Image (cartoon, helix red, strand yellow):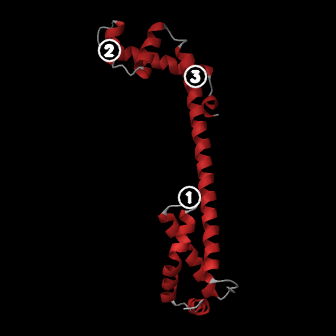
Amino acid sequence: MKDKEIFERICSGDEKTLEFLYKKYYRMMTKMVISNSGSEQEAKDIYQDALVVFWQKAVSGNLVLTSKISTYIYSICQNLWRKELDRKKRLSNEEKDSIEYIEHDKEERAKIINKCIHQLGDTCKKILMYYYFDGMSMQDIADDLGFANTNTAKTKKYKCKKKLDELVKSQYTESDFLD
């Protein structure tokens, strides 16, 4: 089939011709996407989207074809793939910015908490550091600090945590944690 006949059939809504067109240019169109950092699935999706665009324009009667069908569909594929690459790049940059912000935010919070922990008494400082930073069990903390049992260590940890919360709230505002 020649381009003119294919185009006329597509304009009249012949879906069999669309299938023929899909098979005829499949390798050429998908190769373009794959050779430009795309996966095979992305290439299929782009090609299908391009054919939908071509089909809709042809059937609407608004398409005046001044080049070969393959050239026209290829340019649609290129444009769609460029848009997809731009979208991916934007998302990637947004993720990097977000990760950097989160890491910076965690560091700032850790500095504030650390500063306040060091303002507590020696026992509270040890309990909180052992529990939250060293991951020690309450039994190990009780043994290390000479408490009668784990319940005593838990009670002391609770009181120390409460003191720490009060210290943080008295010295810092909520915006210090949100900026």
Residue type at tag 2: Asp
- Residue to which mark 3 is pinned: 111
Tell whether label 2 touches label 3 (CB within 8 Å): no
> Circle 1: is it few (<14), some (14-19), or many (20+) Cα within 10 Å?
few
Q: Mark 3 or 2 closer to N-term?
A: 3
Query: Percent position (x, y) of residue 4?
Result: 62, 92
Q: In which quarter of the image is residue 157?
A: top left
Name the residue nearer the viewer: 38 or 45. 38
Above or below — where is 104 with respect to 53? Answer: above
> Circle 2: is it few (<14), some (14-19), or many (20+) Cα within 10 Å?
some
Q: What element carries label 1?
A: loop
Name the residue rendered at 33%, 12% in the picture: 142
- Residue to which mark 1 is pinned: 37
Determine whether, in the image, residue 82 is placed left or right of residue 150: right
Name the residue rendered at 56%, 78% in the picture: 52
Q: What element carries label 3?
A: helix
Above or below — where is 77 with respect to 99? Answer: below
The numbered dot on residue 153 is none
Q: Quadrant of the N terminus?
A: bottom right
Q: Mark 1 or 3 closer to N-term?
A: 1
Residue type at tag 3: Lys
Q: In which quarter of the image is the C terminus?
A: top right
Q: Nearer the viewer, mark 1 or mark 3?
A: 1
Residue type at tag 1: Ser
- Residue to which mark 2 is pinned: 140
Query: Percent position (x, y) of residue 118?
Result: 54, 13
Q: Which of marks 2 and 1 is in front?
A: 1
Name the residue nearer the viewer: 124 or 75. 75
Q: How far apart are marks 3 and 2 (CA)?
A: 26 Å
Q: How far apart are marks 1 and 3 (CA)?
A: 42 Å
